[in-house]
Image (tube, rainbow, N blue to C red):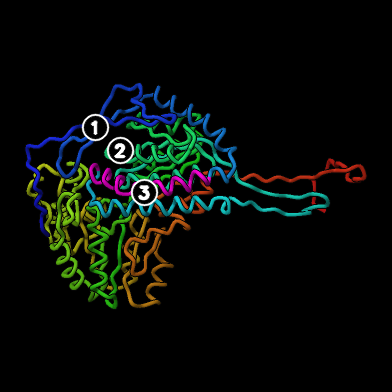
Amino acid sequence: MTAQTTPETTGSTAPVTDITHWIDGEADAGHGERRQDVFNPATGRASGSLHLGDGEDLEKTLQAARRAADSWGEMSLSKRMGVLFRFRELVAAHTDELAALVTAEHGKVLSDAAGEVARGLEVVEYACTMPQTLKGDYTDQASTGIDVFSFRQPLGVVAGITPFNFPVMVPLWMAPVAIATGNAFVLKPSERDPSASLLLAKLWKQAGLPDGVFQVLHGDKEIVDGLLTHELVDGVSFVGSTPIAKHVHETATAHGKRVQALGGAKNHAVVMPDADLELAADHLSAAAFGSAGERCMAISVAVAVGDAADAVVEKVGQRARDITVGDGTESETDMGPLITPASTERVRRLVGEAEADGAAVVVDGRDLVVEGREEGFFVGPTVLDRVKETMSAYEEEIFGPVLAVVRVDTLEDAIRVINANPYGNGTAIFTGSGHAARTFQRQVTVGMVGVNIPIPVPAAQHSFGGWKDSLFGDLHIYGPDGVRFYTRGKVVTQRWPHENDESTASMNFPSNG
């Protein structure tokens, strides 16, 4: 692994940006007096001052959302789609600007940030198909003179609480589907990288979205709990850690909300002896160390089966050493910093505990220093071999650039390891055997499975979501499940009587005939 040298001198400073809410169609500093610093993780310096909302800001936002939902939900699909199509073009045109904001506050490299925008755009494009997706069902002459039809209507006001690791993509997994189906959407982004959400708000307005249909309210636990309990909120979408996902699900459902809460992950990739090991090593390295491992679909465990183990460790170790770590704005950089100093300390602690418990540290990124970015939040790619299921580095979600290698004898052993893990977000198998792949995909208790693909994020026409402690709620995010989540079904049974109609009312329970 190498450290990217950055020409900036350590004594330089940059202006601190004032970061406001977006309420009822305009930037709004809010009523709350509390602020929180936003940092550039590559430099370790504050780059923004974020306004944190209070109860008055929450009430103002939700009242605006309620007014907007009443009119937006009644607007024709053709007019809604006109806004969605214009929004899609605007986001595509501002990809570089969005990516720069993400890199400045998250730290991921610019190409990765642009890729995040592209994956979000796929969901916007799916939302543009809503006139077809929302088509209902119709049964003519279900009973004599009676027709039955069904359709779906918006929930009303829905909230999205999104994580720091994808400040553009995850909001775009939620808001376009919610808005296309006729809801008003309130976004509570992460306090760590909030600026991209404000650019999205401006693009929605520029696309012609009425004020109040998309709003951004910054805050911490006070605002989150307010969204979970307020009577004006009809549904809540959440992506984040499992403990918070449990809290969101339990609190919001107790207050009558519809909830989808996506939690943490411990994603395994099985490598069979018959796999293309060069391909597997390439993809394991990219999936483990891309975005510094701060992805809910990152591969953090390689389950090496039988004779594949030694070769996997050697090949992945070499690729880890070749990764250039540095400022995400530099073209030579492969991997940027972690999001906070606490994140770096967590990674170092878990690697140290694994080493003390007998794991082999094949590649050690704990002491990496990037020249010219000595105050940045950096940890280098790390590879651990002979990791046991009882080690903290296996049990905990590291959310950093660490790949743990677990050795097993058979495919059955690999499936047992994965199924015993409390998380069930994503998994993968690298193999040349169709039989092994089919056995794996049918027996593994995980929501998203890749075959020779390490990060199996479904296309927008499908839905994203895990099993077990990776999802709380019945419906996954975006795609068909997203449409069902943001709408409610309604069935109409109708008769149009005429003067010669001989049907009579009856005290008996009605039957069709």
Closer to the chain start, of discs 3 and 2, is 3
Q: Is residue 396 left or right of residue 475?
A: left
Label 1 crowd (10 A; few <14 / some 14-19 / many >=20): some
Q: Position of residue 416 (x, y in %)?
A: 34, 65
Q: Is residue 334 above or below residue 308?
A: above
Amino acid tagged 1: Thr
Question: Is 99 one of the magenta-colored residues?
Answer: yes
Question: Is 398 one of the magenta-colored residues?
Answer: no
Q: Is residue 319 left or right of residue 432?
A: left
Judged from the image, the secondary structure of the residue bearing numbered disc 2 is helix
Please provide the residue range marked out in magenta.
81-105
Tag 1 near tag 3, CB within 8 Å: no
Q: Nearer the viewer, residue 428 or 459?
A: 459
Residue name at image x 15 percent, y 65 percent: 317
Q: Position of residue 88 (x, y in %)?
A: 43, 48
Please name the residue that numbered disc 3 is placed on: 93
Residue 144 visible in image:
yes
Label 2 crowd (10 A; few <14 / some 14-19 / many >=20): many
Judged from the image, the secondary structure of the residue bearing numbered disc 1 is strand
Q: Is residue 367 left or right of residue 266?
A: left
Judged from the image, the secondary structure of the residue bearing numbered disc 3 is helix
Between disc 1 and disc 3, the foreground one is: 3
- Magenta-highlighted stretch: main secondary structure? helix
The answer to which quarter of the image holds residue 298 is bottom left
Return the mark for residue 195: 2
Amino acid tagged 3: Ala
Q: Is residue 414 left or right of residue 443?
A: left
Q: Quadrant of the C terminus?
A: bottom right
Please name the residue that numbered disc 1 is placed on: 17
Between the C-alphas of marks 2 and 1, the distance is 9 Å
Between the C-alphas of marks 1 and 3, the distance is 23 Å
Between the C-alphas of marks 3 and 2, the distance is 17 Å
